[in-house]
Image (cartoon, helix red, strand yellow):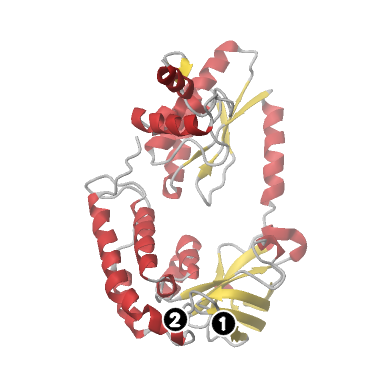
Amino acid sequence: MINLEIPAKLQQVQQMAQQLAAGVFRPIARKYDAIEHCDTPEELKPVAQMMAAMPRGSGGKGGGDEIKNGSNMTGILAVEAMCWGDVGLMLSIPGSGLGNAAVMAVGTPEQKEKYGKLYCAMAITEPGAGSDSAAVSTTAELDGDEWVLNGEKIYCTAGQRCDAVVVWATLDKSLGKAAIKSFIVPRDNPGLQLVRVEDKMGLRVSDTAALSFNNCRIPKDHILGSAEIGDTEEARKKAFGAMGRIAPDLLVQDATVPRTKLPEVLAGIDDIGSRYGLKIANVFHAGDGNLHPNILFDRQNQKELELVERASKEIMQLCVDAGGTITGEHGVGLDKREYMTLVYGPAELQAMAAAKQVFDPDSLFNPGKVLPEVEGAELGVAMKASTVS
């Protein structure tokens, strides 16, 4: 069951963030909104030091009260409270740039140690490439022991004040998004130029910059992750065809777990497959923990079909026990609705059914899906019948 109350130890974090918003951000918000273009506000430097001294969560279970994904929830609560104080000031806290998240997520231990505590911006958007990251045209070419970057970036938050920039660039534009890699570029690196800082109508204290890279050379080890170009899209397309050659039928499941739990959950899925004598192939989005266990079977074999259904439910239970949920992108249909009780309790399901009843009194929207059966009827239909009676 999902507990919608904020755990006691995270309430302290929320209260601290609220005090920061009320005592620090709000009193200076108008002043810096009027100034707009300036160095990092002095009032934010102690805030950055305090945040840097706080222990980083692992993304797994917390202490004593068994909070799962505590670091993620802490971040959400703190950001929400600080945004009430002033969004622009929240975005201007040194050491909290988008680039920091990238370094800590995929950087090597050496990169994390060197750049993790600095103020790192993220440079993705270009004049000809907005939210379509596959259209990035900034190039990175390996020349001996150095990468050479060329291109232009716009709308880079903290691009003026940061210590370093995480830059998205392509190794080979003809290969599309598979060739796009991230590079750490120190802000004072030769070849990196601040073109301008934008004038804005809101969030004025948060600097938004345009940057250019002209034969900008950085050491070979400044790439985040591997320089190898893998055609992951093509591999994924071929994966399902390959599985079709192994077995005539395939049950594609969909669940999401904390990324830190991926090794544990994948091992558990392998164990479930072994116990039931089933082949299970995993095709998934490792970056967001969205798993797709593919159970191979033959529907003409009734006994095997029963084993598939049992294994499928065990996989869902495994993911929920790891702090995950029963779907990441495919939604809840005829198969998944019976797993809703693994995640939600009776009161929560009743609330969902009541909400559905408001917008769908005749149960015309996806009848028989999403909500589980209760005493032989779909929960929403059962609620309507009890209301009418």
Q: Please report the residue visible at 45 percent of the width from the left and 17 percent of the height from the top.
A: 385
Say above or below: 322 vs 180.
Answer: above
According to the picture, the residue beneath numbered tag 1 turns out to be 199
- The mark found on residue 33 in the picture is 2
Return the residue found at the far right.
174
Q: Please report the residue visible at 32 percent of the width from the left and 47 percent of the height from the top.
A: 61
- Check disc 1: other Cα within 10 Å, few if <14, some if 14-19, many if 20+: few
Report helix, strand or loop for mark 1.
loop
- What amino acid does circle 2 point to? Asp
Left or right for 62, reference 221: left
Which quadrant of the figure contains the C terminus?
A: top left
Task: Give whichever of 230, 170 is nearer the camera.
Answer: 170
Q: Position of residue 365 (x, y in %)?
A: 58, 29
Q: Is residue 270 visible?
A: no
Q: Position of residue 113 (x, y in %)?
A: 41, 71
Return the residue found at the far front.
388
Q: Please report the residue visible at 53 percent of the width from the left and 15 percent of the height from the top.
A: 306
- What amino acid does circle 1 point to? Asp
Task: Give whichever of 114, 259 is nearer the camera.
Answer: 259
Label 2 close to label 1 by CB (< 8 Å): no
Q: Is residue 330 visible?
A: yes
Say above or below: 377 vs 69.
Answer: above
Say which label, 2 or 1, has the lower sequence index: 2
Task: Give whichever of 361, 376 is nearer the camera.
Answer: 361
